[in-house]
Amino acid sequence: MARAYDVVVIGAGSTGTTVAYYLVREGFKTLVIDKRGVAQGMTAYSLGLVRSYYANEDVARMSHYSHESS
């Protein structure tokens, strides 16, 4: 029997689980999938360099360091 979902969230890190939480709160039938399981990866890998401008110099350095290290 197939299950129907309104939304599928790919990634069970801090971002994915937060999005899923609020979707469920709003009444959406939500499925969260992640190949590694809940909180098994680093959200920083996917969000670390979405933007290139940071007002805080330390945060900018950490972002660039994490990108170079991956």
Image: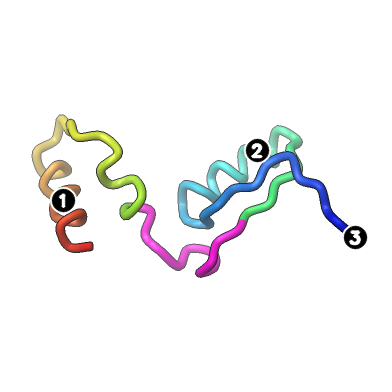
Residue 64 is situated, as x and y percent measured from the top left of the image, at: 15, 49
* Camera-side residue of 21 and 50: 50
Q: Residues within 10 Å of mark 3 (few under 14, many from 20)?
A: few
Amino acid tagged 1:
Met
Residue 36 is situated, as x and y percent measured from the top left of the image, at: 50, 69
Mark earlier in primary sequence (2, 1): 2
Task: Please say if the residues under marks 2 and 1 sit with CB atoms less than 8 Å apart.
Answer: no
Tally the marks: 3
Q: Write down the residue under mark 1.
A: 62
Q: What SS does tag 1 mark?
A: helix
Task: Examine the rendered structure and indicate whether residue 61 appears above or below residue 55.
Answer: below
Q: Write down the residue under mark 3.
A: 1
20 left or right of 66 in image: right
Q: Quadrant of the N terminus?
A: bottom right
Identity of the residue drawn at 15% across and 30% down: 55
46 left or right of 21 in image: left
* Badge number at residue 23: 2
Q: CA distance from mark 2 to mark 1?
A: 31 Å
Residue 40 lies in quadrant: bottom left
Which span is picked out in magenta?
33-43
Q: What SS does tag 2 mark?
A: helix
Magenta stretch contains residue 7: no
Q: Quadrant of the C terminus?
A: bottom left
Identity of the residue drawn at 60% across and 58% down: 33
